[in-house]
Amino acid sequence: MRHALMTLLAALGFVTPGPINASNSETTAGGPVSYIVYPIGWVRRSDDKTFIEVDKRFLPALMGVDELKSIWVLYWFDRNDTPQKRSMLRVHPRGNPDNPLRGVFATRSPLRPNPIALSQVNVLSVRGSLIEIDGIDAFDDTPVLDIKP
Amino acid sequence: MRHALMTLLAALGFVTPGPINASNSETTAGGPVSYIVYPIGWVRRSDDKTFIEVDKRFLPALMGVDELKSIWVLYWFDRNDTPQKRSMLRVHPRGNPDNPLRGVFATRSPLRPNPIALSQVNVLSVRGSLIEIDGIDAFDDTPVLDIKP
């Protein structure tokens, strides 16, 4: 029954036909079919302040971030990192059924094959491993993957 | 000798002290310490045109991309996905020793802990699994991880 439902959903384009993983991914000229990323820091919320706490091993990589007015933050929608959520291909934007269906690549939905979030934020200060920012649409302790000017 | 050099480079903040991997990553409240990403498509260069070819399994996720003027493309610096290049924390921007050292998080260097690239590009057309774009600073066959409005 569940299999029939998933087959129907795949035929309608809502989900991928079967799980996506290394063993059934397409490959490019023999290259790897999946890659590993790891947190370089985490979003930390404290009272009305928001920080990115950088893993101390990466502290030297912050040199110069204090001179930037804004940064791009790439972070991981860790609450959506399940095979099922990562197989969703079409959504009603903002979860509102009144919004017409769209492909996830035309939305900012956290349901997407690689649940990477992207936000531009303002840098308020950098002290040690803590970057104070003006805010970010992320839960406390969200893993951060990258910071760019 | 190599070990002594790496120890010196780590002490100077050029590289991480030892490889970064799941077994020595910090963890957040018992959560995973690394995540898997996989290509959802590839950069394709043909004569003077540039495309993103989306893996056919993800075709339904493109619905609505044709209505977007520009998209953000997240892609993988696959030529820099080595433990050594991913341990670099400070670089001379654009590889020019005349540029003062900066932390990689204050640069767009392809040498970074998670070698994810980010570019905003203009959408020229969407035909089947091919998005024609106006250009991107990436080699042919570069793996694409995500597309966002």
Image: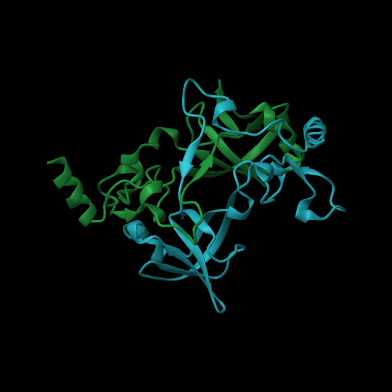
Chain colours: A green, B cyan
Q: Can residue A72 be seen from the camera position used here?
A: yes
| Residue B62 picture location, percent across and down | 37, 60
Image label count: 0
Q: Quadrant of residue B136?
A: bottom right
Nearest the eye: B18 or A41: B18
Residue B129, x across and y down, in percent = 38, 66
Which residue is more in the foreground, A48 or A35? A35
Residue at the location (54% across, 40% down)? A37
Q: Is residue B136 above or below residue A145?
A: below
How far across and down, in percent of the image, does residue B26 sit?
Answer: 58, 25
Image quarter in which the N terminus of chain A is found: top left
Q: Please, which residue is most extreme toward the left here?
A: A1
| Image coordinates for residue B9, horizontal then vertical, percent | 80, 36
Find the residue positioned furthest to the right: B98
Instruction: From the viewer's side, name the closer residue of A72 and B7.
Output: B7
Q: Is residue A111 left or right of residue B9?
A: left
Q: Residue at x 54, y 63 (%)?
A: B121
Q: Is residue A127 left or right of residue A36?
A: right
Q: Is residue B78 above or below residue B18?
A: below
Q: Quadrant of residue B79?
A: bottom right
